[in-house]
Amino acid sequence: MKSRRSSRRLRRGMHLLPSLFTVGNIFCGYVSIVKATTGDYELAALLILIAAMLDALDGRVARMTGTSSEFGVQFDSIADVISFGVAPAVLSFSWSLSTFGRVGWTVSFLYVICGAMRLARFNIQSSHQDRRYFVGMPIPAAACIIATTIYAHPEAPDAENDPFIGVMLLMLVVLVSFLMVSRAKYRSFKDLDLRSSRSYKYLLVPAALLCIAALNPQMVLMLAGFGYLLSGIVPRLGPARTEPQARADEPMPAPGGVFPPGADDAR
């Protein structure tokens, strides 16, 4: 009798585990917003990066524990809007976009709207897409590009003496906003199979970046983010247009948080 109760409690605890990662994701996004408004831009940017790590883990934990649920799917989508939509917008606005007045808050709001549209579009189109690629830049990647840029330069720029940096961030926010709702294809790496010898070629670049990161982690993270941004808009780095579409019987990736068995992260 006691063993049955223990097993039931264990199963209930396992169902809560993926949602705890999502709660951590929301917590990092919320604290990032608070820190951005108080001028601690470095920590605010770092918290967005940590939220992205937690966001990548919750779905994998759900698959490993067999605790996928529709609640987890919806919960994670809401978390993404907070941590990768609102938090980067507030961070960029507080860091330099506020100096542009109405243009600044309009651009930051544009980012939030495009991020929300990106998530909504994925939710209704995921079953019809080639699972090897994202159509449009994923919202966590867009958030990380903004966060790594500010993380590499945490001191707010002087709008009077050096307006160039603020203008560059303004253009960057506009660019990633439109890339999220564009038809540009970004590699998802969901077809990466570590059991195959051919898949290890994809690990060479991350391995090299990790080695260089020991010298200057902020700069390496920023360069990695811009490298992923370019991969969707530079033709020779992007996917070939002649590649076949995914079969209808392939597993449908969920919008985040909790995944069907065999699915992978997708936004």
Image (cartoon, rainbow, N blue to C red):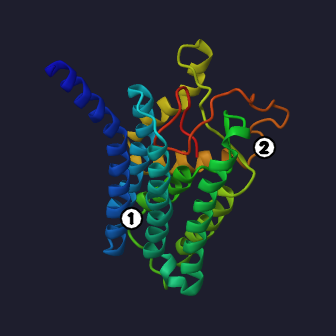
Any part of residue 30 in sight: yes
Along the polypeptide, which appears first: circle 1 or circle 2? 1
Q: Nearer the viewer, residue 50 or 200?
A: 50
Q: Nearer the viewer, residue 109 or 9?
A: 9
Q: Looking at the picture, which amino acid does disc 2 mark? A: Pro
Where is residue 134 drawn, in percent x and y?
Answer: 66, 43
Q: Which mark is residue 154?
A: 1
The local crowd at label 2, few if under 14, some if 14 to 19, many if 20 or more residues have their Cα within 10 Å, is: few
Q: Looking at the picture, which amino acid does disc 1 mark? A: Pro
Asked whether disc 1 touches disc 2, contact meaning CB atoms under 8 Å apart, the reply is no
Where is residue 63 drawn, in percent x and y?
Answer: 45, 29
- Residue at 57 percent of width and 20 percent of height: 193
- Residue at 45 percent of width and 46 percent of height: 71
The quarter of the picture where residue 178 lies is bottom right
Where is residue 61 drawn, in percent x and y?
Answer: 39, 32
Q: Nearer the viewer, residue 126 or 185?
A: 126
Q: Residue furthest front?
A: 1
Distance from the alpha carbon under mark 1 to that under mark 2: 32 Å
The quarter of the picture where residue 48 lies is bottom left
- Residue at 53 percent of width and 18 percent of height: 194
Identify the residue position indicated by label 2 in the image. 235
Q: Which mark is residue 6?
A: none
Which SS class for mark 2?
A: loop
Q: Is residue 255 above or below residue 206?
A: below
- Residue at 54 percent of width and 13 percent of height: 195
Q: Residue furthest right?
A: 242
